[in-house]
Image (tube, grey):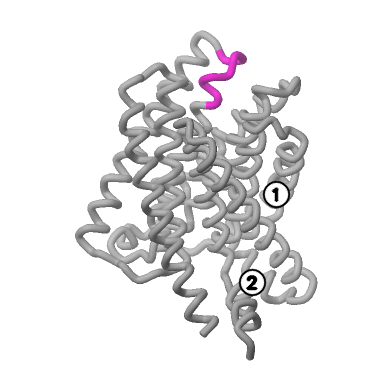
Amino acid sequence: MTRATRLAAWWTGLTPAAGSAVIATGILSVGLRLLGHGTLSRAALVLACVAWLGLAADFVVRLVRHRARWESEADTPAALTAVAATCVLGTRLSVLDRQFPAVTLLVLAAVLWLFLLPAVVRHWGHRMPGAVFLVCVATQSIAVLSATLAAVLPARPLTAVALAFFCLGLALYAVAFARFDLANVRTGAGDQWVAGGALAISALAGAKLVAAPAFTGTGHDVLRAVTLLVLALDLAWYLVLLTAEVRWPRPRYDVRRWATVFPMGMTAVATLSVSAATGVNWLLWPGRLLLWIAVAGWLCVFAGAARAAAGRAR
């Protein structure tokens, strides 16, 4: 077997959890742009696009040629990374004023969400890992992209869509928390961080809505208070999860470690965005610090993925 064949086998053997790599890279691109690092942001966007295209092609191949495997994976929470990855990519493209591909990705994400979410929920169990919170992440990612597009397109219903998905995402978080095995904070392979990441993307969606001119008066005040509360809960989760990493270190690479990086990046971007939307200026410095921590985490996990790919090639 040639090296190229072994690498291809490694790629096709990846689980749906690999979609978290696109989310992690895409949200870092958004965060780096917020801090004015245009070149790094565009480089991260290119990597996210390449990874998304590769995983999308593999998704189609499995659907057409390996239907049994595709159906078994579509029932797992990790399958919902496809929705979130698509929306995060669309959000970054919208910021680049590429509205047509952003709208296309929103439609694609909505179709995937409608198909995958019921299948995932039907196969929920008890004492589940952190991936259970992907039902919230996928839902809030649609809220984020809808609100982003509503700010630049003459499509007022998008604001209502964003608000509806924001509220639904919060409800799904509560349901997922009831099924989450808290022992995963100590034993999880990386996806336990999604417990905080789901709140981070919820806070980001809230920040987008707070900044929308459609909400004024009491509606605006309620959204602002809810968004600040959600961000506070996310930061509390961040401290708990970081403490658990120090107390019970898990240094070995696992593809689920990408589900550690994207909540880190999402928390940073949410903190920066909430600061701008609510006028709480002191949140800027922790947002900047958290972003560079997320970048360091991305580099570590990328190095682990590269070593795993090289080992498979050998």
Q: Residue at x 58, y 19 (%)?
A: 212
| Magenta stretch, overall SS | loop
- Local crowd size for mark 1, using a 10 Å CA cut-off: few (<14), some (14–19), many (≥20): few
Q: Residue furthest top?
A: 217
For the record, the magenta segment spans 208-215
Q: Nearer the viewer, residue 97 or 274?
A: 97
Q: Secondary structure at mark 2?
A: helix
Q: Which mark is residue 125?
A: none
Mark 1 and mark 2 lie on one chain; the one further toward the N terminus is 2
- The residue shown at (60%, 50%) is 85
Residue 114, numbered label:
1
In the rendered view, does 171 fall on the left or right side of 247?
right
Work out which residue is located at the far left of the displayed protein and give it: 247
Kindly check if marks 1 and 2 are in contact, taking CB atoms under 8 A apart as contact.
no
User: Circle 2 is placed at which residue position?
Assistant: 72
170 vs 251, left or right, is: right
Query: Residue 268, image x and y in percent?
Result: 40, 38
How far across and down, in percent of the image, does residue 213 sit? 59, 14
Q: Is residue 203 above or below residue 5?
A: above
Q: Amino acid at mark 2?
A: Ser
Magenta stretch holds residue 83? no
- Kindly identify the residue that appears in the image at 48 percent across and 69 percent down: 306
Q: Amino acid at mark 1?
A: Leu
Observer able to see residue 179:
no
Indicate the position of residue 266 as horizontal and vertical percent values: 45, 42
Task: Identify the element where label 1 is drawn.
Answer: helix
Residue furthest right in the image: 64
Q: Report the Cα–Cα distance between label 1 and label 2.
A: 17 Å
